């Protein structure tokens, strides 16, 4: 994966979740826009300033932590499915 600077945010304010750590972040004006690219040249998505500033080792740790949280979340979701799903109409 490669993280590239794509220029400045400009006049359009953007608010989105970081594709890597999942944190919401906003960009405006002179803020730099960064995008992660896969080794195959495919765009992965926008990256927050925290991930950009973390450096290679810090970013690796952030990715491991997010992967851990996603596994926990996946287990919780699978548990909900195992409990069974019912729909009840109002009234
Ligand atoms: Zn991030």
Image (tube, grey):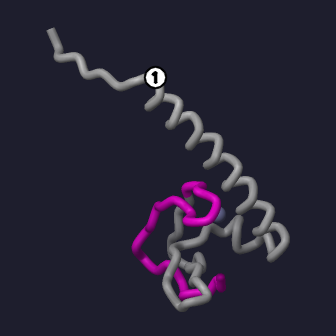
Based on the picture, tell me whether residue 7 belongs to the magenta stretch: yes
| Residue 81 sits in quarter | top left
- 73 lies left or right of 66: left
Residue in front for this viewpoint, 31 or 66: 66
Residue beneath the point at 46% across and 61% down: 15
Q: Which region is colored magenta?
A: 1-24
Residue beneath the point at 68% across and 54% down: 66
- 60 lies left or right of 24: right
The rendered magenta stretch, by its main secondary structure, is classed as strand
Residue in front for this viewpoint, 73 or 82: 82
Residue in front for this viewpoint, 13 or 79: 79
Query: Tag 1's secondary structure?
Result: helix
Residue extending furthest toward the left: 91
- 86 lies left or right of 37: left
Looking at the rendered structure, the number of numbered marks drawn on it comes to 1
Q: Establish if 1 lies above or below 16.
A: below
Residue extending furthest toward the right: 57
Q: Give coordinates of residue 13: x percent, y percent.
A: 44, 68
Q: Which residue is mark 1?
A: 83
Based on the picture, tell me whether residue 75 belongs to the magenta stretch: no
Q: In the rendered view of the protein, which quadrant contains the N terminus?
A: bottom right
Q: Establish if 74 lies above or below 88.
A: below
């Amino acid at each position: 994966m490669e993280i590239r600077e794509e220029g400045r945010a400009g006049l359009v304010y953007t608010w989105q979740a970081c594709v890597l750590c999942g944190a919401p972040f906003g960009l405006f004006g002179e803020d730099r826009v960064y995008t992660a690219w896969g080794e195959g040249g495919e765009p992965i998505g926008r990256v927050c300033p925290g991930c950009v500033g973390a450096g290679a080792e810090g970013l690796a740790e952030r990715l491991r932590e997010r992967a851990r949280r996603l596994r926990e979340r996946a287990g919780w979701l699978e548990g909900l499915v195992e409990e069974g799903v019912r729909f009840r109409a109002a009234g």
